[in-house]
Image: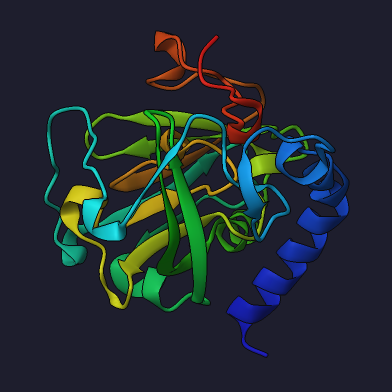
């Protein structure tokens, strides 16, 4: 076992001991009567949250704050800081050297559309958290993007194994308009909770609302509760 593998294994054991119970109690895992339509998805929720229309991947809309940062992988860096024992920074090559996963996910946008079975490749958020070792008082993470965007997540949502920082989609580098070189995907919440062009993960000892949350969007963002706004 390499030193990196040992650090990840030890960090994951600590995270699972602290957070698995709270992860299991989140709405997308525990709601007995979730809202929505269709057969159950991979998480046991209806395939379509209430009020959604299903699009094909070729129809994937582009939504942002009006600018598209173009960051060459050689210049990209991910910083992890805040309420952590071991602040970290990863270059592109260092990020690619971390354990990679391939996952198929559904993508649900609060504006009323969903895309099913997107294929992503990336690094689990929990892997990065295992290396940074969140402090005992850490409860949330703020995700910062190169365009000034931010969004907050409670750790019981962020530490789910399907939360990824992705760099590829269907075997191709993630397109810049969809957040390349690296974006976050959080399939059990509305998609605005996954920041495009992600550059920093700031662990917090208390909740702090991000860009859309302070503008009236739901702070919790649970699709199968139709949880869109305050």
Q: Where's the C terminus, which quadrant?
A: top right
Q: Residue at x 73, y 63 (%)?
A: 12
Q: Position of residue 65 (x, y in %)?
A: 21, 27
Where residue 53 sits, quadrant-wise, is: top left
Q: Residue at x 45, y 30 (%)?
A: 151
From where the camera sits, is residue 40 visible?
yes
Q: Residue furthest front?
A: 38
Drawn side of residue 221 relative to residue 122, left or right: right
Label count reads 0
Q: How is the image coloured?
A: rainbow
Q: From what the image shows, is residue 217 above or below residue 7?
A: above
Q: Position of residue 2 (x, y in %)?
A: 62, 87
Foreground residue among 224 and 27: 224
Foreground residue among 139 and 1: 139
Q: From what the image shows, is residue 173 above or below residue 90?
A: below
Drawn side of residue 158 relative to residue 170, left or right: right
Q: From what the image shows, is residue 224 above or below residue 74?
A: above
Q: Position of residue 97 (x, y in %)?
A: 43, 79
Q: Residue at x 24, y 56 (%)?
A: 180
Drawn side of residue 162 relative to residue 185, left or right: right
Q: From what the image shows, is residue 5 above or below residue 123?
A: below
Where residue 137 sits, quadrant-wise, is: top right
Foreground residue among 88 and 41: 41
Q: Residue at x 66, y 42 (%)?
A: 157
From where the camera sits, is residue 181 visible?
no
Q: Where's the N terminus, which quadrant?
A: bottom right
């Amino acid at each position: 076992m390499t030193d990196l593998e040992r650090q990840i294994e030890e960090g994951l054991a600590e995270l699972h001991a602290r957070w698995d119970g709270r992860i299991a109690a989140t709405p997308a895992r525990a709601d007995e009567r979730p809202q929505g339509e269709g057969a159950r998805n991979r998480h046991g929720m209806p395939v379509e949250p209430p009020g959604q229309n299903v699009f094909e991947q070729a129809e994937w809309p582009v939504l942002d704050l009006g600018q598209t940062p173009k960051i060459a992988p050689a210049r990209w860096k991910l910083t992890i800081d805040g309420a952590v024992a071991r602040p970290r920074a990863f270059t592109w090559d260092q990020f690619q050297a971390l354990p990679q996963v391939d996952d198929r996910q559904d993508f649900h946008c609060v504006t009323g559309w969903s895309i099913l079975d997107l294929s992503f490749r990336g690094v689990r958020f929990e892997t990065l958290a295992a290396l940074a070792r969140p402090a005992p008082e850490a409860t949330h993470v703020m995700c910062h993007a190169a365009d000034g965007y931010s969004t907050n997540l409670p750790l019981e949502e962020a530490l789910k194994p399907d939360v990824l920082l992705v760099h590829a989609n269907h075997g191709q580098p993630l397109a810049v308009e969809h957040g390349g070189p690296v974006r976050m995907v959080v399939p059990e919440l509305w998609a605005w909770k996954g920041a495009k062009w992600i550059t920093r993960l700031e662990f917090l000892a208390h909740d702090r609302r991000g860009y859309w949350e302070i503008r009236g969007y739901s702070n919790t963002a649970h699709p199968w509760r139709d949880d869109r706004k305050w």
